[in-house]
Amino acid sequence: MIRRCTNSEFGTILEIINDGAQAYRGVIPKGLWHEPYMDDNELTEEVRDGIVFWGAEKDGELVGVMGIQDKKEVTLIRHAYVRNNLWRQGFGSALLRNLQALGQTPFLVGTWAGALWAISFYEKHGYRLVSETEKNLLLRRYWRVPHAQIATSVVLVDSKWNPDGT
């Protein structure tokens, strides 16, 4: 079942993000990786900044989360994680399909350039990588990330994306 997460699930959302983020250990450049990957304050700030989390359940337990953030002309996919022991069981795909059905604007997602499994996941769902120049522009326009993260990230866009805005 896919559903919108509630405020009372804050701790579970944080736990899933930190569990799922372990896959990025060794992929995220030194100096950008930290433990925990996300802390209470960071998650609070992300929610305050407009990220709405949706969750995938298995047997009544939240096992995956994916956030969306409305940026008027686009929707960002933010913090998409499934518990490590439940990868490749369709939870991420179900979350993505559900969220895409909610949106009318183009969807964009940023991830680490070395996270080939994440890039492949989005490509499997019809997303495409943008050029280096476009990536840099999009990350500066829609995300708040350090310069070092911009240099080591990629952006993927769905089929509704039109860089000319026409």
Image (cartoon, rainbow, N blue to C red):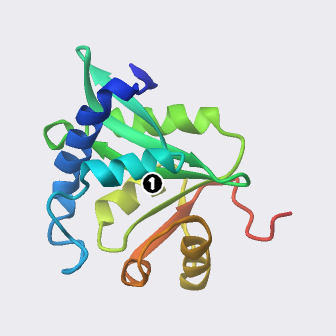
The answer to whether residue 74 is visible is yes
Where the N terminus falls, by quadrant? top left
The answer to whether residue 90 is visible is no
Q: Residues within 10 Å of mark 1 (few under 14, many from 20)?
A: some
- Residue corresponding to mark 1: 122
- The outermost residue toward the top is 60
Q: Nearer the viewer, residue 5 or 108?
A: 5
Q: Nearer the viewer, residue 119 or 6?
A: 6
Q: Nearer the viewer, residue 144 or 75?
A: 144
Residue 32 position in % (x across, y down): 25, 75
Residue 8 position in % (x across, y down): 33, 24
Give the left or right position of residue 121, taking residue 77 as reference: left
At a point 57% along the width and 75% down the height, the residue shown is 140
Q: Is residue 63 depicted above or below 129 in this figure? A: above
At a point 30% along the width and 66% down the height, the residue shown is 115
Where the C terminus falls, by quadrant? bottom right
Give the left or right position of residue 82, taking residue 111 as reference: left
